[in-house]
Image: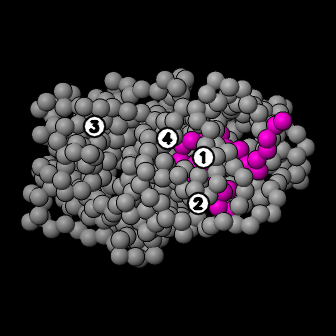
């Protein structure tokens, strides 16, 4: 006999576990299928930041920044063992493309969108204190701005959200890979392999949160739902010996003006990220030598102590994939707004499959809330068990 669930989620990254938590909190039966391990993909290979997206102001994504700053404040309150406020430094040199007046305007708007809370205000570091900044190059330095954002262990946060979902009654099937699904009038019949055994489950709604694999998942559903055209963009990070101590540095690549973070990470220093179009198998993503060299040059430009023994100082490198809308031009200018793509239009009925394209670590809970609103019409009325806006998260 085939069992049934209100919601089946495919993908154990931050978006998938966020939906599992939201569905369980709303009182629904939910099962999450993860083919490998929680946060095995992009959700363990991010920049480890819970931030409002200061640079998104350059592309006028004000609503995204406002939402992210609200979610950051919420996570600081609900997950104090997992999300910590950190001091950020923005050094501005004579050849920096973003001039001091522009950065000051951006930080002022950032604070305004964050409700002018204490933790979103900024200041300028006096010249007398520049020598405190971990050996940062001070030649031709015009100004240093300070503000705050937050840092997390992305894999630990993902596990904590899944633990919260399980506490509310959600089921985790892992390792479990979707092998196919058939759409029906009332939902879909989901087929998967769990620990080598073939299983099936009826679902009123299938939520596709498979990250870089989303369109591969859609290709296993019959009849095939429509797909968004996407680009996969690789972001790589390096971890090098020796930890910066004064906080996180938000610097500019001299070559192309990209924003790069240099930050303390588990006794070492992490630097990233890159943006490289990816056309291979998402299961085989690896940092490219060109990306490693690019990040080493940026790091050495601002912190010469790393230039002497680079690349021997590199102790780890990892890469993740962003899902962005397909289009011309540089990925830097593509929207970071999440796209929720249903298998059918509203006039045809509620979604049987809802695919999540994109999304940010910081705003996973808000994304899950939007997913639940979008699929509500296809779900039965249930008594809510909790409110994710108030659910505390504990470190796994």
Give coordinates of residue 217: x percent, y percent: 68, 32
Res 39 label: 4
**Which residue does the image show at 53% across and 28% down from the upper left?**
282
The residue under label 1 is 16
Give coordinates of residue 313: x percent, y percent: 19, 31
How far apart in space, not on screen, are marks 4 and 3 (Cα)? Answer: 19 Å
The residue under label 3 is 239
The residue under label 2 is 366
Q: Label 2: few (<14), some or many (≥20) within 10 Å?
A: many
Which mark's residue is nearer the viewer, 3 or 1? 1
| Disc on the earlier residue, 4 or 3 | 4
**Which residue does the image show at 70% across and 66% down from the upper left?**
384
Color scheme of the displayed model = one colour
Q: Name the element at disc 2.
A: helix
Along the viewing direction, whichever of 304 and 184 lies nearer the viewer = 184
| Disc on the earlier residue, 4 or 1 | 1
Q: Are marks 4 and 1 in contact (CB under 8 Å)?
A: no
Q: Which residues are magenta?
A: 1-26
Which mark's residue is nearer the viewer, 4 or 3? 4
Which mark's residue is nearer the viewer, 2 or 1? 1
């Amino acid at each position: 006999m085939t069992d049934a669930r209100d919601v089946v989620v495919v993908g154990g990254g931050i978006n998938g576990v966020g939906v599992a938590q939201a569905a369980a909190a709303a009182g629904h039966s939910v099962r999450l299928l993860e083919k490998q391990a929680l946060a095995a993909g992009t959700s363990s290979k991010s920049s480890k930041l819970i931030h409002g997206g200061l640079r998104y102001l350059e592309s006028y994504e004000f609503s995204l920044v406002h939402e992210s700053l609200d979610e950051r404040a919420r996570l600081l309150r609900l997950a104090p063992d997992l999300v910590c406020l950190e001091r950020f430094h923005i050094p501005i040199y004579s050849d920096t493309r973003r001039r001091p007046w522009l950065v000051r305007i951006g930080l002022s708007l950032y604070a305004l969108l964050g409700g002018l809370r204490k933790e979103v205000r900024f200041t300028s570091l006096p010249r007398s204190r520049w020598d405190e900044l971990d050996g940062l190059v001070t030649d031709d330095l015009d100004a240093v701005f300070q503000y705050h954002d937050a840092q997390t262990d992305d894999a630990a946060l993902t596990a904590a959200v899944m633990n919260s979902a399980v506490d509310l009654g959600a089921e985790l099937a892992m390792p479990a890979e979707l092998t196919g699904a058939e759409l029906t009038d009332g939902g879909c019949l989901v087929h998967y392999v769990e620990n080598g055994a073939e299983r099936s489950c009826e679902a009123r709604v299938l939520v596709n949160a498979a990250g870089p694999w989303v369109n591969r998942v859609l290709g296993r559903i019959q009849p095939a739902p429509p797909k968004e055209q996407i680009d996969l963009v690789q972001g790589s990070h390096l971890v090098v010996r020796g930890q910066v101590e004064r906080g996180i540095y938000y610097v500019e690549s001299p070559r192309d003006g990209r924003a790069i973070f240099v930050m303390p990470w588990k006794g070492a220093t992490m630097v990233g990220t890159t943006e490289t179009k990816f056309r291979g198998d998402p299961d085989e993503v690896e940092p490219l030598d060109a990306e490693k060299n690019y990040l080493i040059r940026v790091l050495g430009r601002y912190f010469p102590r790393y230039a002497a023994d680079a690349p021997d100082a590199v102790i780890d490198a990892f890469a993740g994939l962003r899902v962005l809308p397909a289009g011309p031009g540089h990925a830097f200018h593509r929207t970071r707004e999440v796209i929720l793509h249903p298998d059918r239009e509203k006039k045809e009925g509620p979604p049987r499959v809802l695919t999540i394209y994109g999304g940010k670590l910081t705003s996973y809970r808000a994304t899950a809330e939007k997913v639940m609103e979008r699929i509500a019409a296809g779900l039965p009325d249930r008594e809510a068990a909790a409110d994710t806006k108030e659910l505390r998260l504990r470190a796994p």
